[in-house]
Image (cartoon, rainbow, N blue to C red):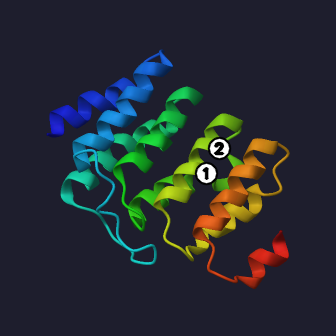
Amino acid sequence: ALEALRSAAGCLEDSDERVRSAAVAALGRLVSGGSRASNLPPDAPCQGTPLRSAALAIIEPHLCHQSADVRGAAAEAIAAVALRGDIAAEVALVGMFADGQEKDDDVRWSALRALQEVSARGSAPAVEIAVRCSRDPDEQIRVAAVQALAAVAGLGDQEVLAAL
């Protein structure tokens, strides 16, 4: 299984978007059998299974790749393999926003969408990033940020409501 994960993750670096997209789908199927039905409740933190943890470790270095296309595909792959509330996956995605280091709009959009999928409701780091991105100059980023807030902010969170 690990060799299959490594092979699929290697395809995240392919120059063809269709291959990268197929790699994301394959990684998700390899760790979950194609089913996301095993997601934990939205407020339950988890570390994931050993296979999910291995997949995350194999994918995570791609988040720092020189190619924006690869970084975006890696963010999508993390969302494909992680369960909601997977702290390690969330930390990896949050790292993409450290000090405004990610300049590519498409990568930030992919990372926000992935953060929305993996973060537990009420996750302070995810909420902080989404609030910050709700003020981004790029319209797609602002839309993704508001969608992420809807998924991860605590219900009735007054700080989030005030920020919007």
Q: What residue do we see at 42% from left, 57% from top?
A: 89
Q: What residue do we see at 45% from left, 73% from top?
A: 42
The correct choice, above or below, for 44 with respect to 29 in the image is below
Question: In which quarter of the view is residue 46 placed?
Answer: bottom left
Q: What residue do we see at 81% from left, 44% from top?
A: 139
Whole-percent x, y for residue 125 in the image = 59, 68
Taking the image as shown, residue 81 lies to the left or right of residue 148, namely: left
Which residue is disc 1 drawn over? Answer: 112
- Which quadrant would the N terminus be assigned to in this image? top left
SS at badge 2:
helix
Q: Amino acid at mark 1?
A: Leu
The one of 103 and 99 positioned closer to us in this rendering: 103
Q: What residue do we see at 63% from left, 73% from top?
A: 153
Q: Amino acid at mark 2?
A: Arg
- Which quadrant would the C terminus be assigned to in this image? bottom right
Residue farthest top in this picture: 15
State how many labels appear.
2
Q: Residues within 10 Å of mark 1 (few under 14, many from 20)?
A: many
Which residue is disc 2 drawn over? Answer: 108
SS at badge 1:
helix
Q: Is residue 134 visible?
A: yes
Whole-percent x, y for residue 161 in the image = 79, 76
Q: Are marks 2 and 1 in contact (CB under 8 Å)?
A: yes
Whole-percent x, y for residue 146 in the image = 72, 59
Taking the image as shown, residue 1 lies to the left or right of residue 55, namely: left
Whole-percent x, y for residue 138 in the image = 81, 42
The correct choice, above or below, for 102 with respect to 39 in the image is above
- Compute the Cα span from label 2 to label 1: 6 Å
Taking the image as shown, residue 5 lies to the left or right of residue 92, namely: left
Q: Residues within 10 Å of mark 2 (few under 14, many from 20)?
A: many
The one of 104 and 112 positioned closer to us in this rendering: 112
